[in-house]
Image: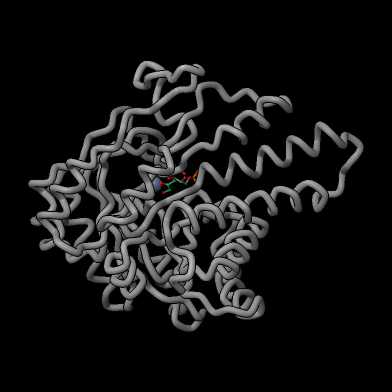
Amino acid sequence: MSISYKDLGLVNTKEMFAKAVEGGYAIPAYNFNNMEQLQAIIQACVETKSPVILQVSSGARKYANATLLKNMARGAVEYAKELGYEIPICLHLDHGDTFELCKDCIDSGFSSVMIDGSHHSFEENIALTKKVVEYAHANGVTVEGELGVLAGVEDDVVAEKSHYTKPEEVIEFVSKTGVDSLAISIGTSHGANKFTPAQCTRNADGVLIPPPLRFDILEEIERKLPGFPIVLHGSSSVPQEHVETINKFGGAMKDAVGIPEEQLRKAAKSAVCKINIDSDGRLAMTAAIRKVFAEKPAEFDPRKYLGPARDELKKLYMHKNINVLGSADKA
Ligand code: G3H
Ligand code: 13P
Ligand code: ZN
């Protein structure tokens, strides 16, 4: 039996994005697959009065179970109200790779889907994206498409090299598909190792400095599509404090490097109205859990290590909303 996102109290991205583009900020799109992550996202977004996109990859959907996820999203809406402030909440499929998956998500309460046809040819990407848009729009669901390929691991899609979005393709893609937003490739990348040391420079302290984002490409895309909502994937900043904590307490993360927050802040002030963050949350959680395991080896109650992990996550999301995305006080 299918259910509409409206019955779960969710919203699509239409109004969120219009306000974000107009107001020069970006909506946070945080990935989740378990209760503690969802609690931290909702607590942080209610406390900072920020709209939010709850993002679920196909891997996360398999991990958590579709029925549970749907009811977790419904619960998140109720939980936000219980915390005392109603914020717009969208449930979004991250990196959908087939029409069938997108349809299944639309039929089970998602208010927004991404169809990632970026690994197909331009023509095939258009055809697949258009098919998803037709079904989604008939159900009031918004759609994110992608042009250009990010480096790193995208769920089941692996891109060894980044191919920047070609500005000359964006008008045709958007007009032929009818998408509501467009994910572009301007130098961000998925995961915690976004760049090899060879691609970076080092500052005086030996810290890796990644190559800057291609704001020239973003500006050209904005000129072609004035006011159209743009999305940045792979936008974790890989906080070095968490990497250091992980490594101090038995981890082995080498040369982990992310996108500097000032560059994301600059992007958020432009037509970029959705910024995807997953890896930073993974790092914050892992650092907190490793610390408890190392300092309290006798502890075996999951609440004693998942609780501190949840607190760290909440801190991270509040910081992003306030200082990076500019979405605080916009709900
Ligand atoms: O872009 C990918 C997201 O970080 C989701 O990752 O497929 O491991 O859940 P995942
Ligand atoms: P990060 O790996 O940089 O967090 O990117 C997440 C993402 O793009 C999810 O779609
Ligand atoms: Zn992504």
Q: Is 286 drawn above or below residue 176 in the view shown? A: above
Residue 59 appears in the picture as rendered: yes
Where is residue 35 shown, x and y percent of the image?
66, 60
Task: Indicate left or right for 120 with 196 as reference.
Answer: left
Residue 2 appears in the picture as rendered: no
Q: How is the image coloured?
A: one colour
Where is residue 228 shown, x and y percent of the image?
20, 62
The quarter of the picture where residue 189 lies is top left
Nearest the viewer among 217 and 265 is: 265
Task: Indicate left or right for 20 with 289 as reference.
Answer: left
Q: Quadrant of ligand 2?
A: top left
Where is residue 84 shown, x and y percent of the image?
63, 79
**Measuring 54% from the left and 37% from the top, which residue is drawn there?**
239
Where is residue 43 shown, x and y percent of the image?
63, 65
Q: Give the farthest residue toward the right.
A: 298
Q: Give the farthest residue toward the front.
A: 204
Q: Is 128 drawn above or below residue 104 in the view shown? A: above
Nearest the viewer among 316 and 141 is: 316
**Measuring 63% from the left and 59% from the top, which residue is drawn there?**
40
- State the count of labels: 0
Q: Is 19 drawn above or below residue 62 in the view shown? A: below
**Measuring 23% from the left and 58% from the top, which residue is drawn there?**
129
Q: Is 170 drawn above or below residue 155 in the view shown? A: below
The quarter of the picture where residue 24 lies is bottom left
